[in-house]
Amino acid sequence: MAQNPANSGESSDYDAFVLKDLFPDAESIFSFEPRPLLVIAPESLIVLDTNVLLLPYNTGKNSLAEIASTYRRYVVEKRLMVPGQVAREFAKNRSDKLKDLFQQISRKRDVDLKSQSYPLLESLDQYQAVKAAEAALAKQLTEYRSSVDQLLKVIRNWNWNDPVSALYRELFSAGVVFDPELDREELRKDLAHRQAHRIPPGFKDSNKPDGGVGDLIIWHTILAAAKARGLDVIFVSNDVKNDWWYQSEKQQLYPRFELVEEFRRISGGKTLHVVRFSEFLELVGAQPEVVNEVRVSEAQHPEITVGRASSTYPLMRRWLETLYPDRDVEYTFFPDLTVKTEVGWMGVETRFMLDASAAEATINHLLSVSRGLRSDEGYLAVDVVLIAPDSRVANAITKVAAQMGGTSPGNGLVVGYLRGDGEFVPISSVDAHVW
């Protein structure tokens, strides 16, 4: 018999009869057979998650065109759906993708040709040839930096007109975004119940600033759409947390049975499948090179799944205002937050991380961003703050940071976690200035 969490001290709100509510039709546990993915694909409703909408920012022109063609087909067939919550999360996180792009392009200006004079070699033809080549390279570098500056100007002037946003504006017309009116109080009660009993989705996000309600809103939107339209659903998502998937050896096996069963009950016997974006594109016959590029992007950009939590900005601002009660703390586009001191500005770049699996890559990337901000924007110092959902994850990230060694002058690292009341608790720092 499974241990009752109430007896293990996990929650005083634990309902001993929760399994009865989860699986009210016990016979269906054995009798219901979900229809195979290949069978439901031609007629199912395709639902897109936020991380899927953000992923094209890391793909090329050909992949974006293939994605557009795929979406357009389902829009025409009235089988593509973007939950309202997904649209809102995209709006919140889109600027972070453009900031990263701007930073990466901006770093290209840092190519330098250090030319020095060697009088002893002046009489050598070979030395004169080197000097001539250097002069030609210097001219080319000047032209190169000018081209980079023009590209940065284009990116800076984007105002919801970047290629991805423009594509979505064209495709996601009336009827694609589904935003049912959900009772907020009922959502809060349902969220508390699911978290107390570890019922998916959302229980893994209890320490996020929104308490995990975002995933739950998306889930209720999917249920409402399936009930209204009577269709099987393919939910396209790169969310790999175990409140959506059963996992083994750090791999996703199949969707949680609680989700499949709840979907079956609400939809009147329909089937739910959850697939990664690359799997979906492969399923619908996208070009192999496009599928491969998306698959590589899924592996190389874990932050698309983990996400930078813009909703943590208010609590980070409160933390900084506590550290600097007599200073102005402001939200800025790049970096995320700035502290005005008597002698200049200090910047803070933040990242919310659900686990430590991508800690080293994330730290390296953000420290590179921070160094660029100091050299290009004239900040006195720029620190990176990594925000974990709990102390366990924060300690794991700290261990990774310790193994990486120190930072560069003017840049530091702070690692902390979100306390139960939503406040930020720092636990470690490396060369940090905001500490």
Image (cartoon, rainbow, N blue to C red):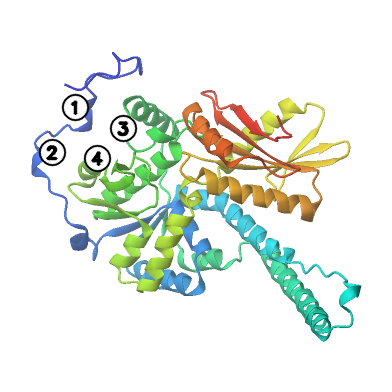
What residue is disc 3 on? Answer: 199
Label 4 and label 1: CA atoms lie apart by 12 Å
Neighbor class of circle 4 (other Cα within 10 Å; few <14, some 14-19, many 20+) is some
- Seen in the picture, residue 235 relative to 349 is either above or below; the reply is below
- Please report whichever mark, 4 or 1, sits nearer to the chain's N-terminal start: 1
Q: Quadrant of residue 129?
A: bottom right
User: Please, what secondary structure does the residue beneath circle 2 have?
Assistant: helix
**Side (left or right) of 372 relative to 217:** right
Checking the image for residue 29, the label placed there is: 2
Query: Label 4 is placed on what type of residue?
Result: Glu
Q: Residues within 10 Å of mark 1 (few under 14, many from 20)?
A: few
For this orientation, the residue located farthest to the right is: 119
Amino acid found under the numbered disc labelled 1: Lys
> In the displayed structure, does residue 120 sit left or right of residue 152?
right
Task: Identify the residue under disc 4.
Answer: 262
Depth check: 367 or 117 in front?
Answer: 117
- Give the secondary structure at mark 3: loop
| Residue 120 image position (x, y, % from top left) | 89, 74
Tell me the CA gap for discs 2 and 4. Answer: 11 Å
Q: Which residue is mark 1?
A: 20
Separation of marks 2 and 3 at Cα, in angstroms: 17 Å
